[in-house]
Amino acid sequence: MSEEPVAVAVGETAETKAKASRFTLKFDEKEEHGQWSSRLAFYMATIGAAVGFGNVWRFPSLAVDYGGGAFFVPYFMALFLLGIPLAILEIGFGQYFQTGDIGVFGTFHPRLRGVGLASVGCGFMLNTYYIVLIAWVVNAFFSSWDEDAPWGKENLTGEEAVNYFYDDIIGGGTVGDDGKPTRIVARNVGFAFLTWFIVFLCVAWGVKWTGRIAYFTMGVPIILLFVFLGKALTLEGSADGVKQYIGIWDMSILKERPEVWSVACSQIFFSIGLTFGILTAFGSHCPRDEPAVTNAIVIAMANSAFSIIAGFAVFAALGHLAYVNESPVLDLPYAGFGLVFGTWPVVFNQLPGGIHWVRLIFFNLWLLGIDSAFAFLEAFLSVLSDTVYFEKVPRFWLAMGMSIIGFMFSLLYCVDSGLSFLDVIDFYINFVMILVGFFEAFGSAWAYDIVGQMERQSKPVVYSFFTANFGAVVLGCILWYGIESRAAIWAGFVGFIGWYFLFLGVTHYYIKQVLANDMDNKWTMKSMWYEVYFGNIVALRDRIQVQIGHVPFVWCLLMKHFIPHVLIILFVNLAQSTVTIDDLEKPLLGNYGNYPVAPYQILGILVVVLTLVLFLGGVLFPDLYAPLALPQTKEAEMELDKYKEPTDAIPSKKDDEEIAGKMDDDDDLKKKEEPIVVADAIAVEEVAESVEKDA
């Protein structure tokens, strides 16, 4: 059979063809699980996902609201004791198992697949309003060319700027006294569609293109941040703003307003992007031998550094505005949208070429938001790509479909009361993500290899030690938050410690029984206690660090004996917090922001309920989510084999090809072995005949 001639362009070489194929945009081909073009691209994309609006206007306002510099105490404790260890978990295990959240946590135990589904589900819900927030910034940017917009007016006041943003940009000027929506703001619908389209383009062709885009979307905001900082610090009165930001340390806040500890934790979670599936998804696109601990530390520290520097830039500008208005710094709008849209445009509008500075601010905010938005979508796509239903769907069409669905949900926030919906849903999502963080830590440190641990040490030992830890936390929370007395703190600690050591005694009793029946002398009292405290988490650490690099022992200690316990306490702490409404103390849950129960509080609580249902669905019906978590590595298949009957094996997406290949190999092997068997049989007969003749 003759070969068809291949046309080759004049001057075309293998190198030029390779370069051309490298930049080809594919629409209908199913792309393999891609990798970042470089570690720097991974850093830029992941830091860009972490750094967003919250770094600019939420972090500085929280610092001032909670005692200035005193807020940095719970903030840095949350960063080093919770944030970085969980970042190591998500990046490292995404990298090790080469898949998203559902696959990672389902590998720890099949009943924990719901943890991954809850995390990426909340991330997708968050993205639907986050993109509308970006759309408002785009609206403000284009409105700066409108004649009736105040951004370029002389003597612009902060109140005028904020009111314009609320009433005209968001469209809240038509909201009635009952606070309920009255219309859809068409202009914001258009900008939301445009933003979703841009986000779609950023992720449609894989992480290599996402990483290249991140060089711009993260690199430019870093440069502009230092430009804004340098300019703001040269203005008169800037020192007063900086003093309010970090120069005042009201340590009494840490005791008088205990919710500060939960708020600092949620700020770390939201800011770094923990519990939303982002770090797991981005880590899954790293080579398996990347240093996961180093990467996690770099990303977390870079995010916090950006937040702190942004705080100086914001409050330096706020101090100058207070100097101009001859008013105290804290009398100005320093929280939320008012901080950015009521301060920076006013201050920079006074500089030469002021309106261009204002437009640059809006452009910078757009860049900060857009890379966070496509990171949330990337996390969801990474999970969908590893499911039975979408494993063969080209990424381009999968990204398009999810963008269309996301846009439809975003319409809720394009009404004139969209800010109210956004504020409420944001609060409840951040609230429930603390619980998701507990599920993640519990899955890795307690549920991993639980079957093997029970076989090695007996169920009574494992269950009693579990009861010692989490029973103590539950009892402590009941006493801390159930007793209305100054003695509550001491009662909680006494109850916590008493319960803990009581059940440690029970554990010790069962350990002695195991040792008494240990005929092979496999255990000693010391080795049994070490196995109880650290056995499964150290075994997991030792297994993964062969691939992802060294993981320090302190990570094991924090993941098993600190983070799960603390997250339960922080969750209860925020859940029982109260708010003053009409001089009455009411529960924060159900009354957040004093918004009407219907539709705002109901919708927010439904988000919490949905998250819990997604989690419990996996716990009660582990096979329900099995099609959503196809194992991507041999290690993942081996882990899942511990929990399955031989007939229940879940095939990976490569199993069909491997099975077919093995069948072909077996057929070839049989063909080769058959003549050998015949030859051996003939040889045996000949030997037998010769022996008979000799006899």
Image (cartoon, rainbow, N blue to C red):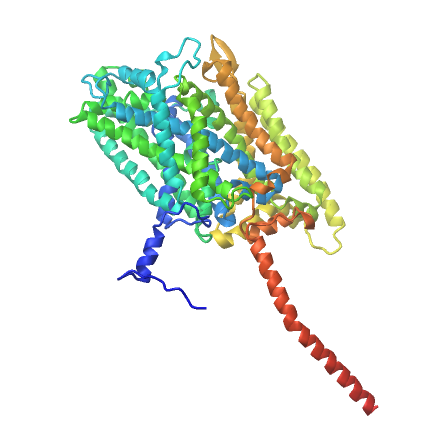
Q: In which quadrant is the C terminus drawn?
A: bottom right
Residue 534, x across and y down, in percent: 59, 45
> Residue at the right extreme?
695
| Closer-to-camera residue (540/457) | 540
Q: Quadrant of residue 57?
A: top left
Q: Position of residue 451 (x, y in %)?
A: 66, 45
User: Is residue 588 shown to the viewer in this render?
Assistant: no
Left or right: residue 670 compared with residue 601: right
Q: Is residue 232 above or below residue 99?
A: above
Total marks in image: 0
Closer to the camera, 118 or 433?
Answer: 118
The percent position of residue 686, horizontal first and vertical second, equals 76, 85
Residue 37 is left or right of residue 655, and the answer is: left
The residue at 30%/22% (across/down) is: 341
Q: Nearer the viewer, residue 67 or 24?
A: 24
The residue that appears at 64% across and 34% down in the rendered structure is: 500
605 and 380: which is toward the camera: 380
**Can you say whether 249 is above or below 24 in the image?**
above
Residue farthest to the front, as pictured = 1
Q: Residue at the spot x=69%, y=49% of the render?
A: 647
- Residue 610, placed above or below residue 678: above
